[in-house]
Amino acid sequence: MKPEGKTAADTVAQNAAFHRLADDEPVWLFGYGSLIYKVDFPYIRRRPACITGWQRRFWQGSEDHRGVPGRPGRVVTLVEAPGAECGGVAYQVAGRVFRSLDVREKNGYLRLWVPVRLAGGDAVDGLVYIAGPDNPAFLGPAPDAALVRQIAAARGPSGSNREYLLKLAAALRGLDEDDSHVYALETMLRNGPGRVDP
């Protein structure tokens, strides 16, 4: 039986143990999913940015935000892809901010240090949350039509999975990012079965 308030993939304690940060320590955080458009945390600076060797994929299950236990939604994680570039947003935050971010990203996401290239060319080391294939909530690849059916049907405490995909696609366009995976799913969702207004 799972402890009250925890999920099978709860990573809060792991993240706190792996990366001990002083409360006032400035740290760069790279966001590539909902952290681009749902900025519910304080930050010092915000810059468009990218990382190399990773690509965004709707391969992570969400039973805590965009789905419920037994009916998970699908949210993005990063998968290794040599030579690929993944665009997003880098935030410089105080170390204390990770206490709340670790709870928000608790369902299978672990913090990793990666090289981040900020808009303008500056390079920094930053933390990124990645849900790897060894976490219990990882769903892995599926045909686009199957991904869209699951996304269209799922809803959780943070809202519909459909809304998550549409907001992410809009945010990436706002950054002038080219993400064929996200945009293909968005097009199918808008045009396919189960279409509803966000």
Image (cartoon, rainbow, N blue to C red):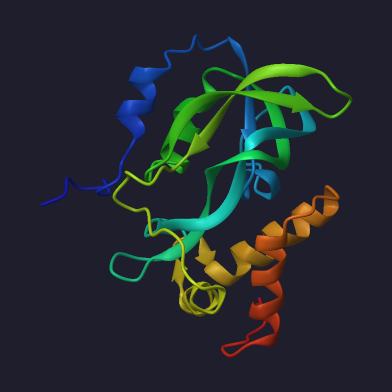
Q: Residue at x 53, y 68 (%)?
A: 161
Q: Residue at x 69, y 45 (%)?
A: 36
Task: Say left or right for 100 vs 45.
Answer: left
Give the x, y percent position of residue 139. 38, 59
Give the x, y percent position of residue 166. 68, 66
44 up-or-down from 31: above or below: above
Q: Farthest residue toward the bottom?
A: 193
Task: Say left or right for 124 vs 151.
Answer: right
Q: Farthest residue toward the right?
A: 120
Q: Farthest residue toward the left?
A: 1
187 up-or-down from 17: above or below: below
- Between 51 and 137, the one lying in front of the other is 51
Task: Determine the image quadrant of residue 192.
Answer: bottom right
Task: Determine the image quadrant of residue 14.
Answer: top left
How many numbered marks does the figure carry? 0
Image quarter (top left, top right, bottom left or bottom right) of the C terminus: bottom right
Q: Residue at x 72, y 66 (%)?
A: 183
Give the x, y percent position of residue 133. 38, 47
